[in-house]
Image: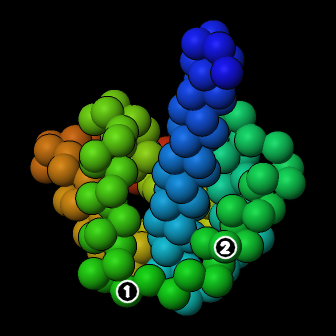
Amino acid sequence: MTFSEQMSIRQDEVRAEASNQDVDLHLIAATLMFAVIRADGDTDHLELAHMVDIMRSRYALSSEEISSLIFSARRASVGDQGLEALAQQLCKHWSPKEREQLLNDFWFLATADREIRIDERLVIELIANNLQLEADDITKARYMAEQRLELNIS
């Protein structure tokens, strides 16, 4: 095998590894989003529709990929410690800006049914703390979601 053939194979392996890592990170994000949706005890169709929109626009995923991720996220039964571990995994691979955007997505999901319940707020704050976001950023994101909710209700 020539050197260029070896390099080509190695490049293909690196691309496959990166693709697998993206899928894993998208699954983690989907699982965390689903935990927010599930937090109030009601899986609202509007929240799921918003989740699909987020995954399509942020991650440029196909409908099949999104369906598969949501199916896997829905099946995952993750307690608080699991949520903490998943959030910490994202910290290893995502920039603070990406993690902040995910926090904003959580609040967007929580407001989809036109109210933010205490259970949703607690789950979001638990995840956000483990995403190693600043307290001010967490508070600001919640405030913006509450403002958006007020504008949509009035």
Report the disc number at residue 48: none
Tag 1: residue type?
A: Gly
Q: How is the image coloured?
A: rainbow
Q: Position of residue 42 (x, y in %)?
A: 62, 85
Residue 149 is at least partly visible in this image: no
Residue 25 is at least partly visible in this image: yes
**Which residue is at 42% across, 73% downward?**
120
**Which residue is at 37% across, 65% downward?**
86
Q: Position of residue 106 (x, y in %)?
A: 47, 56
The answer to whether residue 96 is left or right of residue 47 is left
Q: Quadrant of the N terminus?
A: top right
Task: State whether residue 77 is above or below residue 64.
Answer: below
Q: Position of residue 145 (x, y in %)?
A: 43, 49
Quarter occupied by residue 43: bottom right
The residue labelled by disc 2 is: 72
- The CA distance from mark 1 to mark 2 is 16 Å
Which of these two is toward me, 33 or 18?
A: 18
The answer to whether residue 78 is left or right of residue 67 is left
Quarter occupied by residue 6: top right
**Which residue is at 28% across, 46% downward?**
92
Report the disc number at residue 79: 1
Which of these two is toward me, 53 or 88?
A: 88
The answer to whether residue 1 is left or right of residue 64 is left
Dot 1: element: loop
Dot 2: element: helix
How many labels, in total?
2
